[in-house]
């Protein structure tokens, strides 16, 4: 039996996602503007002292926040902050040029 696709609500900017995006942005700045996503996520999780299930949830939330700010829709309310410099299948995260120069306004 085929599964029925779930209707997903479009991603929207929330205070939690804005905070996570700020943490990703800071970590990318600390890494010179770009780094492998596992390095970025690992350092954020380490700084927060998370492991186990809490780390898994935080990791998914960070991936979601990155995605929202890398490919924001006009109705999401999220600024474009991040890029995938080596294409859509790349795991290298980078700051958008505007995000490198000035802090985002949420």
Image: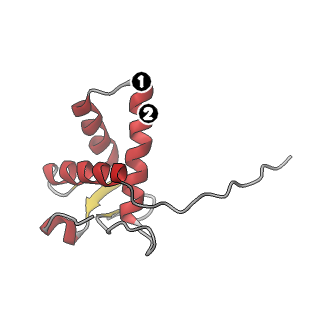
Color encoding of the figure: secondary structure
- Callout 1 crowding tier (Cα within 10 Å): few <14, some 14–19, many ≥20: few
| Residue at horizontal 28 percent and vertical 65 percent from the top | 81
Residue 12's quadrant in the figure?
bottom left
Which label was assigned to residue 56?
Answer: 2
> Which residue is the extreme one toward the front?
15
Which label was assigned to residue 52?
Answer: 1
Instruction: Let me know if residue 87 appears in the view.
Output: yes
| Vertical order, 31 against 42 (above or below) | below
Q: Separation of disc 1 and disc 2 at Cα?
A: 6 Å
State the SS at label 2: helix
| Residue at horizontal 41 percent and vertical 24 percent from the top | 52
Q: In terms of depth relative to the viewer, which is nearer, 88 or 19?
A: 19
Residue 72: percent from the left, percent from the top?
Answer: 41, 68
> Which residue is the extreme one toward the bottom?
74
Residue 104's quadrant in the figure?
bottom left
């Amino acid at each position: 039996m085929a599964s029925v696709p779930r209707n997903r609500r479009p991603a929207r900017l929330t205070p939690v996602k804005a905070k996570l995006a700020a943490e990703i942005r800071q970590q990318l700045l600390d890494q010179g503007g770009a780094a492998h996503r596992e390095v970025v996520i690992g350092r954020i999780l380490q700084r927060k002292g998370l492991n186990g299930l809490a780390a898994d949830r935080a990791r998914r939330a960070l991936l979601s926040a990155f995605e929202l700010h890398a490919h924001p829709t006009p109705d999401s309310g999220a600024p474009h902050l991040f890029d995938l410099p080596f294409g859509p299948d790349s795991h290298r995260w980078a700051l958008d040029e505007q995000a490198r120069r000035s802090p985002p306004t949420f």
